Amino acid sequence: NNQTMEPLFPDSNDSGEASKRLKILTENITYLEKENEDLRERVYDLENSLGIHKSIMNELSDDKKFDPQARYFTEQLNHESELLHKKIEKLTSDKSDLRSRLVIEKQMEIRDSDQEGQEVKALKEELLEMRQNLDRKEYLLQYC
């Protein structure tokens, strides 16, 4: 693993702006990582709680004294609970994917913005050089 990472902002002369943007991106990534960890803990707690509740409901519904109508109702609630749990898992996964895409798109936007800035700077330098050449030629034409 002796590979060096490719710089995020290669040949950037405006390193101050690039550093600010990189710092903002790093802060955003840190925030998202913390939020993801909090969500994982919440999902873990909810899954444990759901498991406990299911066990209690199953114990109650297995009791012979339990009303058949109440047993049916309990089974329906368990089924609906499982469906909702699957929806929550999918939504959590989708949310994580969208946030990851957002971070990547922000990085690409910053990279593209920096590239455009570098291109504009190069064109300005080229224009300045052309003006200087034109001025030299005009000067030479005046004295020749």
Image (cartoon, rainbow, N blue to C red):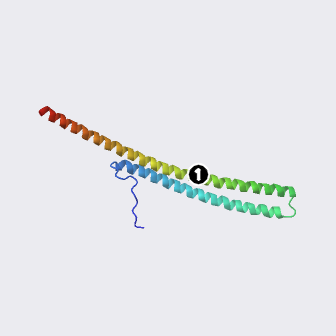
Does residue 98 appear to the left or right of 79 in the view shown? left
Locate residue 71, reporting x and y percent: 83, 58
Does residue 144 appear to the left or right of 53 in the view shown? left
Q: Quadrant of the C terminus?
A: top left
Locate residue 3, reporting x and y percent: 40, 64
Residue highlighted by disc 1: 95
Q: Is residue 128 above or below residue 76?
A: above
The residue lying toward the viewer, choosing from 70 and 80, is 80
Locate residue 139, reporting x and y percent: 16, 34
Farthest-out residue, top: 142
Q: Quadrant of the N terminus?
A: bottom left
Q: Secondary structure at mark 1?
A: helix
Does residue 25 appear to the left or right of 11 in the view shown? right
Q: Amino acid at mark 1?
A: Lys
Farthest-out residue, bottom: 1
Q: Identify the residue at image location x=35%, y=46%.
A: 118
